[in-house]
Every structure is written in structure tokens, then in C-alpha cells.
Image (tube, grey):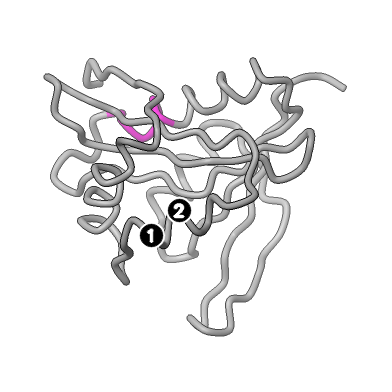
Amino acid sequence: MADATIEAVGMDALPQIVEMYNQIFRPTRDVESFRRRYLGRHNVLQLIARVDDRPLGFFIGFEQKPDVYYAWFYGVLPNTRRMGLGSQLMEAAQLWAAQHDYQSIRLECHNQHRPMLHLAIQLGYDIVGIRWVAERSENLIMFEKQLSER
């Protein structure tokens, strides 16, 4: 496992996050599309995973409901996968959400992203549903993990 530093970053780091996003996902997005998504969102959290001060992965999340945190995007640069960065980002986000009194954390994953599906299950997330995305003709698998006992 890589000895990564996971740090919470402010909006000034959004261009760096978007640059990583565009190296991982398609279609690409611009900074403004992320800013629009953040409008009206509470407790936006941006994390960057760094190894030797190089940004290699990111997490973006926000409040979905008062007791539920939503993991909007996780990403690790393709040439640095299988180093444990995804796990470290997910665990840092879970810890942050628990420290901010969220009861659970949710995420969605495209069915074809098998490594992410396996990682979510390995980290104790439960499958709680499937959502059909008509414009992409794909299923999204919905996951949730309880962060505290009710």
C-alpha cells in the first residue's frame, strides 16, 4: 500500500481535481460544471491523495440528507491504481462524514466499473438498489454504509 497523504482541500484546488477527473472519466467536464453541481450543496468535501507530493487521486462529496453523506466522485489516476489510494480516500471520507455526525454514506457506481464495485463491497458497503440511467443506457449500482449505530 502506498504511503499516501490524504488532505481536505478548498475550492482553489478544484482545477487540479478537474484535471485528474478528466484523465480518468469520460465525457470530460470543466471547472464550471463542478461549481454548478456544488450550488446549494451543504458540506462539500474535496480530498486529494498525494504520494511524494504528487496528486494521484481525489474524492468529492456533499450532504444528500441531514444524516446521509453522498460520495459523488472518487478517482485514482489509471497508472497508479492498485496502490491502495482508493481505499485510503474512501476511509478518509467515511471518517470525515462520521466526525460530522452523518449516519451513513452513499455512493453509486456504474456496473462496468468492477474494481470500484469490489472495493465498495470490501469496505463494508451494502448494495441498496439499482438505478437505470436512460441517457447512458446503463445501470448504476447504489451502495450505502452505516457509519454509526442507530
User: Is residue 139 shown left or right of residue 105?
Assistant: left
90 or 39, which lies in front? 39
**Image point (22%, 51%), residue name:** 19
**Image point (20%, 33%), residue name:** 55
Q: Which quadrant of the view contains residue 98?
A: top right
Which residues make up the magenta segment?
84-89
**Image point (32%, 71%), residue name:** 27
Q: Amino acid at mark 2?
A: Arg
Q: Residues within 10 Å of mark 2 (few under 14, many from 20)?
A: few
Q: Amino acid at mark 1?
A: Glu
Residue 150 place in picture, x, y as percent: 87, 22
Tell me whether circle 2 and circle 1 mark residues in contact (CB < 8 Å). Answer: yes
Residue corresponding to mark 1: 32
Compared to 94, does 69 lie above or below?
Answer: below
99 or 37, which lies in front? 37
Q: Tag count in the figure? A: 2
Compared to 59, does 102 lie above or below?
Answer: above
Does the stretch in magenta take in 99? no
User: Is residue 130 shown left or right of residue 77?
Assistant: right
Checking the image for residue 35, the label placed there is: 2
Residue 95 place in picture, x, y as percent: 56, 19
Which quadrant holds the N terminus? top left
Judged from the image, the secondary structure of the residue bearing numbered disc 1 is helix
